Image (cartoon, rainbow, N blue to C red):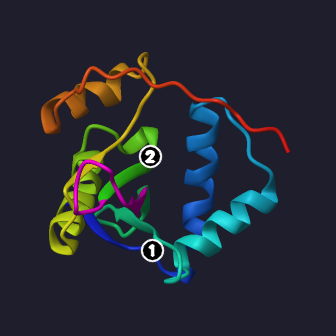
Amino acid sequence: MTRIRPLAAADHDAWLPLWRGYLAFYESHVPDEQTALTWNRLLDPQFPIHGAIAADDEGRTIGFVHWLTHAATWSAAPYVYLEDLFVDPGARGGGAGRALIAHVTEWAEETGAAKVYWLTQESNATARALYDRVATSTGFVHYEIGIRR
């Protein structure tokens, strides 16, 4: 049975290979400094960024979820953006992804948020099969503009 719990400082060494696997899955790279900053923000209660991990029956960390809250123009209550979700490929299909999403949804309900939302790549068929079972596709298309520094 998958168990979900908030991230703790002692989870770093188990979280890091999953984080790197997540970035590799999306063919992305962030500098080590950004990875360290992300980890520190996940543990700092002053930041509206939160994290949880999934552990299997043997206590091995098999997945994580990160989310943040933000004010909204269409709602008095905040929205929850599920920014990162990853389950180790060897543990997929066992319910960890669903449990991680449920954890964020329960957290959102408890804190009075209006909704939970997220993005994924159109080609991410495995994840989208789960998302289609637990959420409603909005039909929106995502665009972005990177800001050069």
Q: Is residue 67 above or below residue 84?
A: below
> Local crowd at mark 1 within 10 Å, few (<14), some, or many (≥20)?
many
Horizontal and vertical percent for residue 115?
21, 52
> Is residue 50 found inside the magenta-colored segment of the image?
no
User: To which quarter of the image does residue 37 belong?
Assistant: bottom right
Which amino acid lies under the numbered mark 2 shown in the image of this protein? Phe
Horizontal and vertical percent for residue 40?
64, 75
Horizontal and vertical percent for residue 105?
20, 58
Residue at 22 percent of width and 47 percent of height: 98
Q: Which residue is mark 2?
A: 86
User: To which quarter of the image does residue 148 belong?
Assistant: top right
Q: Is residue 79 above or below residue 49?
A: above
The one nearer the camera, 117 or 29, is 117
> Is residue 69 found inside the magenta-colored segment of the image?
yes
The one nearer the camera, 106 or 147, is 147
* Mark sitting earlier along the chain (2/1): 1
Residue at 27 percent of width and 20 percent of height: 139
Quarter of the N terminus within the rendering: bottom left
Furthest residue to the top?
A: 123
Horizontal and vertical percent for residue 135?
17, 37
> Local crowd at mark 2 within 10 Å, few (<14), some, or many (≥20)?
many
Q: Which mark is residue 138?
A: none
Tag 1 secondary structure: loop
Magenta residues, start to end: 65-78
Tag 2 secondary structure: strand
Q: Which mark is residue 7?
A: 1
Left of 16 or right of it: where is 36? Answer: right
Q: How many angstroms separate mark 2 from mark 1 (CA)?
A: 14 Å
